[in-house]
Image (tube, rainbow, N blue to C red):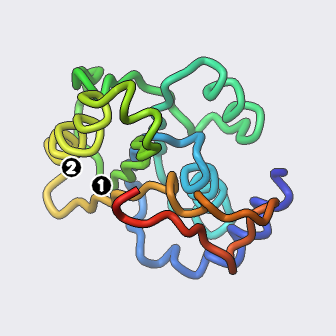
Amino acid sequence: MSEILSEDAMLLAYHADSFKSNARILITGASGLIGINLLALFFSDAFVKKSIDIYVCVNSEASKTFLKTVFPHSRIQFIGIDLVGFEISSFDQGFDYIFHLATYGQPGRFMSEQQETMKLNSVGLIKLFDFLQPNGRLFFASTSEVYSGNPNIPHVESEIGNTTTIH
């Protein structure tokens, strides 16, 4: 799998010039589709020379173990953040870039965890702004519905799901 991620990262590495050197990056939901690809990008040769510090927030030990296996780099620092109750371990400085990917939109999960879902997508997002450096950037995305309803498995990038906005 890391070979595939490395190849994809090389295709995106031309964006390296958009990121400042010695930056601090926080990725929530790093074990998801977008998070894994971001990590692959940030560990590509184009980014390694930028000396970027990467902080990762994942919500399970299994996810942490998986990421340590795929990305055995000492530059990843795992931190604890409760994005629902919003408790964050202390930092001596903020982040230059935050990628908030730890949300979900599955209808079944929403019905069983309604308040938590809404807090992840609202309060958690708003609170993350408090941890941005001045002129920092925050990216918010979720892939939970990108492929939903697509009957073709495995999913490919040229085909998207057919879930509507009222699903």
> What residue is rendered at 76% in x and 40% in y?
70
Residue 109 visible from this viewpoint:
yes
Q: Quadrant of the C terminus?
A: bottom left
Relative to residue 150, is residue 85 depicted above or below?
A: above
Specify whether 13 is left or right of 19.
right
* Residue 164 at x, y percent in the picture: 43, 66
Specify whether 72 is left or right of 80.
right
Residue 51 visible from this viewpoint:
no
Q: CA distance from mark 1 to mark 2?
A: 6 Å
Residue that label 2 marks: 132
Three-letter amino acid code at disc 1? Asp
Q: Nearer the viewer, residue 155 or 101?
A: 155
> What residue is rendered at 50% in x and 57% in y?
145
Residue 42 occupies which quadrant of the picture? bottom right
Verify CB contact (< 8 Å) between mark 1 and mark 2. yes
At label 1, counting other C-alpha atoms closer than 10 Å, the crowd grade (few under 14, some 14-19, many 20 or more) is many
At label 2, counting other C-alpha atoms closer than 10 Å, the crowd grade (few under 14, some 14-19, many 20 or more) is many
* Residue 32 at x, y percent in the picture: 58, 45
* Residue 18 at x, y percent in the picture: 41, 76
> What residue is rendered at 69% in x and 31% in y?
68
Residue 34 occupies which quadrant of the picture? bottom right
* Residue 112 at x, y percent in the picture: 39, 25
Please tell me whether mark 2 sits on a helix, a strand or a loop. Answer: strand
Disc number for residue 96: 1
Q: Nearer the viewer, residue 154 or 96?
A: 154
Relative to residue 15, is residue 137 depicted above or below?
A: above
For marks 1 and 2, the one nearer the N-term is: 1
Three-letter amino acid code at disc 2? Leu
